[in-house]
Image (cartoon, rainbow, N blue to C red):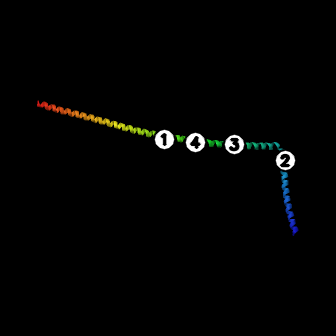
């Protein structure tokens, strides 16, 4: 039984070695094909490598440009937001100024209206006084005429 066990272990190890030899053989064949292709197309491989390097450089350049644009756009958005905020502040200040001016004009108008009202009241009072004086003068004239008629009648 020990010999059977030993035979199985040997057989398993031989299978593993055979598998390793197959892999090694494949690697040698691949290396040979690679060397053959390299010898057959030396310019093509170098050309493909140059194209790969050029593409990598182009991608790096595009990424750099993208990052610069991203930063530039962020700065532009910040500048625009700042400008918008400043404009809103200016508009707010202008509105406040206009409201203050409106209030001042309203007060000024009220003062003028009161002065005009007092002036009209003064004019009306003057006209009333004038009318009263005229009425008194007319009454005095009537009384004088009545007195004159009475005196004339008694002569």
Q: Is residue 117 left or right of residue 28?
A: left
The residue under label 1 is: 96
Q: Position of residue 142 (x, y in %)?
A: 19, 33
Q: Position of residue 19 (x, y in %)?
A: 84, 58
Residue at image point 46% right, 40% down: 100
Q: Position of residue 88 (x, y in %)?
A: 53, 42
Q: Earlier in the sequence, mark 2 or mark 1?
A: 2
* Label 2, label 4: how far apart the Cα atoms are: 64 Å
The residue under label 4 is: 82
Q: For the residue labelled by badge 4, is the local secondary structure a helix, a strand or a loop? A: helix
Q: Quadrant of residue 139?
A: top left
Q: Nearer the viewer, mark 2 or mark 1?
A: 1
Q: Categorize mark 4 by other alpha carbons within 10 Å: few (<14), some (14-19), many (20+).
A: few
Q: Quadrant of the C terminus?
A: top left
* Label 3, label 1: how far apart the Cα atoms are: 48 Å
Q: Nearer the viewer, mark 4 or mark 3?
A: 4
Residue at image point 62% right, 42% down: 75
Q: Which mark is residue 64?
A: 3
Q: Earlier in the sequence, mark 2 or mark 4?
A: 2
The residue under label 2 is: 35
Marks 4 and 1: CB-CB under 8 Å? no
Q: For the residue labelled by badge 1, is the local secondary structure a helix, a strand or a loop? A: helix
């Amino acid at each position: 039984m020990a010999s059977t066990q030993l035979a199985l272990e040997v057989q398993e190890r031989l299978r593993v070695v055979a598998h390793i030899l197959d892999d090694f053989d494949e690697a040698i064949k691949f290396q040979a094909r690679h060397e053959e292709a390299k010898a057959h197309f030396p310019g093509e491989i170098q050309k493909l490598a140059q194209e790969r390097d050029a593409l990598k450089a182009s991608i790096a350049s595009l990424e750099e440009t993208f990052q610069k644009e991203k930063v530039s756009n962020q700065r532009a958005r910040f500048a625009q937001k700042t400008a918008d905020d400043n404009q809103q502040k200016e508009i707010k200040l202008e509105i406040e100024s206009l409201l203050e001016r409106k209030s001042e004009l309203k007060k000024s108008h009220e003062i003028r209206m009161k002065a005009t009202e007092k002036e009209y009241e003064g004019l009306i009072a003057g006209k009333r006084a004038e009318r009263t004086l005229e009425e008194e003068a007319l009454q005095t004239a009537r009384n004088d005429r009545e007195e004159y008629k009475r005196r004339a009648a008694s002569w």
